[in-house]
Amino acid sequence: MNPTMRAPNLCLMTLALVIAPAYGWKLSQGGERQFRYIDAAKNMIVLADGGRSEQTSAGTYDLTLTGLVSIDSLSQGLHLTADKVQCQTAKAANNRMDVKHAVATGKVHIVKTVANKGAKEITDITCSKGDLQVAATGDIVALAGPVSLRSESPAKRRTLTATGSSGTAVLEPQAKTQAKDGIRTAHLAGPVKLTLVQPAEKPAKTPADAKPPGEAKVVATSDEMDISNTATLRTVILRGHVKIDGEGSSRVGSFSGIRQATVVLNAAGEVISVNTGDMN
Amino acid sequence: MRSKHTLLAALVLLLAGCNPKPGEKGAEVKEEKKPEALPAMTVNLAAGSNTHYAPGEKRDPQWYVSWLKQAAVVLTQVKEKPDAKEKKPAVKNEISHMEMLGVSGYVFDKGKESSTYTADAGQGDKKTQILSLHGNVHVISKNPKSELFCDRLEYDASKPKKLIRAQGHVRVVQAVGTIGTLPALWASPDLKVVATPDLYNLR
């Protein structure tokens, strides 16, 4: 055997012999993530590079979490990731732990998934600072920094995406809900950009060789925006320097120079009307 | 056999505790004269127990340890220079270090029993004021109800804010959840606060 061929193999073998047990030891010691918490009901899972837990009273904890923080609460349909999170938990039924209050900073990503009779509604929020206060009337999230708010209904192929500089949102508190949207209400301060995407309405009679209609898109910009999904008809109110453009197969035309506009959506999340207020 | 061991343990502890208490006549003399260190003496014991106290006048209890199998107790003898009245030099015996097998006991915090523990082996050191536990370490706190499991543990009683430093496969099982398994975790004596070492002293 050529001795020059043997040297690299020996090097690799030595390296493997050193690295493999070290990696195995690291995994056995708790893996890459330093801090991990799971409640007795396996409902809440917390992962972070560093963590501190202090029991404040029976069953409640103050958690300080740093470095690639991830919090999942299945009963609340909540998935939160951030660079740093200060979190208070509350003891719920059946040894379950819920998030009561969380202040997240740095690359904050909140995903709230609610299910109504099996149909999932996903709310996806990104910002640089988020303050989540859980209450029976809804989870109140104060958002700061560049904010992106996305509401998605995969079954209905409908999405609402809004961006702004700051805002607040009230989300459905539980994973299982009678509501048809994860967002109850939301307010975004500008400059706001709203994009509504929904599948095109099928015409009553379609020729056999006709191309399928493309998706309908409504793009709007304004100084501020309010979303309300609490009534049967949902509304998106845009205020200040409103500009609206219907794209694709959307039947909404183009509007500009409007002080206020109200986009009305039906229960399926389809745009049924755009009402404009005063001109600028 | 057991009574023999107990008698031996009692003798060692009696020797360790025979130094005068602060405020007594001997203690006044001690401050003026430099003690002369004698060679340490190791005593091997079978089953026994010991309470470790903080140095100084207050002598707060720091930990209680009971060992089932055997213990090596290092006694440091300090000979004090005789004063004008006493012709013979006084000899003071102190437990400076203990190595024990099959340990259990409890740690004190602010003078009160805080958590109980068991481990395969333990070491207590007077100078560092650290109780080290090794192998199948299990700490139980009653209030709040919490349990800590790890490979190695140090109970550091040297500072007013006492601290548990756990290492190796650390797991804390609380009433409503589990933290771990982690390579290292620090905790308060009652396990109320548990944290990765970088975040323990955050507040």
Image: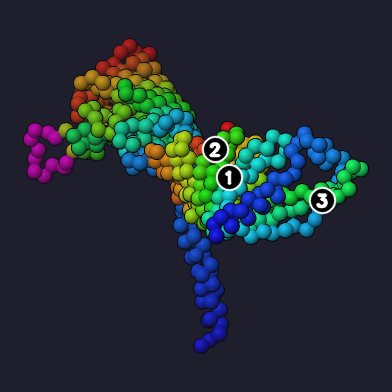
Is B27 in front, or is B117?
A: B27
Q: Which residues are magenta?
A: A202-212
Amino acid bearing label 1: Tyr
Q: Residue at x 63, y 50 (%)?
A: B10
Q: Quadrant of residue B27?
A: top right
> On the picture, is B12 further left or further right than B193?
right
The answer to whether any part of residue A34 appears in the image is no
Q: Callout 3: helix, strand or loop?
A: strand
Residue A156 x, y percent position in the rendering: 21, 36
At label 2, counting other C-alpha atoms closer than 10 Å, the crowd grade (few under 14, some 14-19, many 20 or more) is some
Task: Determine if the magenta segment contains residue B20.
Answer: no
Q: Are marks 1 and 2 in contact (CB under 8 Å)?
A: yes
For the residues labelled 1 and 2, the Cα–Cα distance comes to 9 Å
Q: Are marks 1 and 3 in contact (CB under 8 Å)?
A: no
Q: Are marks 2 and 3 on the same chain?
A: yes
First-in-chain label (1 vs 2): 1
For the residues labelled 2 and 3, the Cα–Cα distance comes to 34 Å
First-in-chain label (2 vs 3): 3
Q: Callout 1: helix, strand or loop?
A: strand
Amino acid bearing label 2: Glu
Residue bearing mark 1: B64
Q: Residue at x 66, y 39 (%)?
A: B159
Chain of the residue on which disc 3 is drawn = B
First-in-chain label (1 vs 3): 1
Give above or below for A189 relative to B138: above
Q: Residue at x 48, y 40 (%)?
A: B141
Give above or below for A254 relative to B38: above
Chain of the residue on which disc 2 is drawn = B
